Image (cartoon, rainbow, N blue to C red):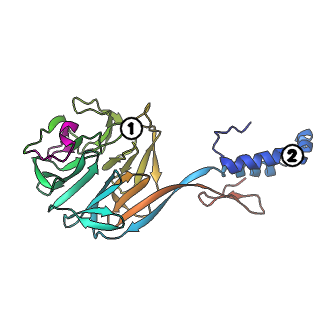
């Protein structure tokens, strides 16, 4: 079968194939195809299959916030809350306290920096003033609009007419537009949400009568959308997954792929190619996804292995 440029064997595999095609012995083998050493050929094919370019997540602990509980990243900014309900902003390599007390959830994005305190009161960073309304979770990552979830799982939206600029209003006109969702996050291609049964839903941008579509697959307790449209979720057991195949024509994506993290995770956020995560023990992790080529290891018995796979018997 011919190898096409898009086949998942990687550049190294294609170079190895071309070198083999140019070898003078290959022509004698073709003339004597009934004398092939089948075990050698099988091993060669297996080498090609393991030369795929994969992606490895490298995670590093970020110091400065003790016992973190939640994190959000957007527009190059990172905010987090801790177990004592303090909120923090990361600038460079240093964390700074945000004004306001008893915040259990903060979010940063095109709509600004927003927070919700332990009494479900809503705050926005304009000298961190109190806004009208009561929410349990808020997200500022949409197209300059903010969304949130109330204590009775009612969903609310604040249009970008009221989130632009730094003007503080005495009262913000939050619009209730859906019931039965407990977590919201919006990004470049649309909004994602989770219901109390951990089912996942998607809709395109809309603050008025959004049409939610059930996304089949895994149950999630947290779902977060990056400013570029990337989507990550955390399962009830603390595993992290990324939604693949997302683009303008398929904004809901195609499938879920596991992101290997060595500890149990309670919350995630994604921005500018970096995945930020909070473990159940309160650690903050910064993870970077780098493409790597897995070099094969061939032992004298013809068994091929790679650092990311188990030995395969030929």
Dot 2, crowdedness within 10 Å: few (<14), some or many (≥20)?
few
Q: Give residue 229's quadrant in the image.
A: top left
Query: Residue 159 in the image: x percent, y percent?
Result: 20, 37
Q: Give residue 218's quadrant in the image.
A: top left
Query: Is residue 159 visible in the rendered structure shown here?
Result: no
Q: Nearer the viewer, residue 76 or 50?
A: 76
Q: Residue at x 16, y 53 (%)?
A: 126
Disc marking residue 160: none
Q: Secondary structure at mark 2?
A: loop
Disc marking residue 216: 1
Up-down: is 56 above or below 62? above
- Residue range corresponding to the magenta coloring: 148-169
Up-down: is 64 above or below 168? below
Q: Nearer the viewer, residue 272 or 80?
A: 272
Query: Is residue 158 visible in the rendered structure shown here?
Result: yes
Dot 1, crowdedness within 10 Å: few (<14), some or many (≥20)?
few
Q: Is residue 293 left or right of residue 23?
A: left
Q: Residue at x 33, y 47 (%)?
A: 223
Q: Which residue is mark 2?
A: 36
């Amino acid at each position: 079968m011919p190898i096409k440029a898009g086949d998942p064997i990687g550049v190294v595999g294609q170079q190895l194939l071309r070198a083999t095609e140019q070898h003078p012995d290959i022509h004698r083998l073709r003339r004597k195809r009934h004398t092939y050493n089948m075990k050698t050929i099988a091993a060669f094919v297996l080498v090609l299959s393991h030369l795929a370019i994969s992606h490895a997540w490298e995670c590093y602990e970020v110091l400065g916030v003790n016992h973190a509980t939640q994190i959000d990243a957007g527009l190059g900014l990172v905010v987090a809350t801790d177990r004592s309900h303090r909120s923090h902003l990361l600038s460079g390599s240093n964390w700074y306290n945000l004004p306001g007390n008893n915040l259990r959830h903060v979010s940063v994005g095109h709509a600004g920096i927003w927070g919700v305190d332990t009494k479900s009161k809503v705050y926005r960073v304009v000298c961190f003033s109190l806004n009208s309304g009561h929410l349990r979770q808020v997200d500022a990552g949409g197209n300059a609009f903010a969304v949130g979830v109330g204590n009775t799982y009612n969903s609310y939206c604040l249009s970008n007419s009221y989130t632009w600029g730094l003007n503080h209003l005495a009262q913000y006109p939050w619009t209730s537009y859906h019931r039965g969702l407990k977590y919201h996050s919006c990004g470049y291609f649309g909004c994602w949400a989770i219901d109390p049964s951990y089912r996942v839903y998607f809709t395109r941008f809309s603050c008025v009568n959004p049409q939610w579509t059930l996304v089949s697959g895994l149950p999630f307790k947290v779902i977060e959308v990056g400013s570029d449209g990337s989507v990550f979720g955390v399962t009830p057991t603390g595993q992290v997954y990324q939604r693949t195949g997302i683009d303008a024509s398929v904004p809901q994506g195609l499938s879920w792929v596991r992101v290997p993290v060595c500890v149990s995770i309670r919350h995630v956020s994604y921005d500018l190619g970096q995945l930020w995560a909070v473990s159940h023990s309160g650690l903050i992790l910064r993870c970077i996804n780098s493409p790597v080529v897995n070099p094969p290891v061939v032992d004298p018995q013809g068994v091929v292995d790679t650092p990311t796979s188990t030995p395969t018997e030929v």
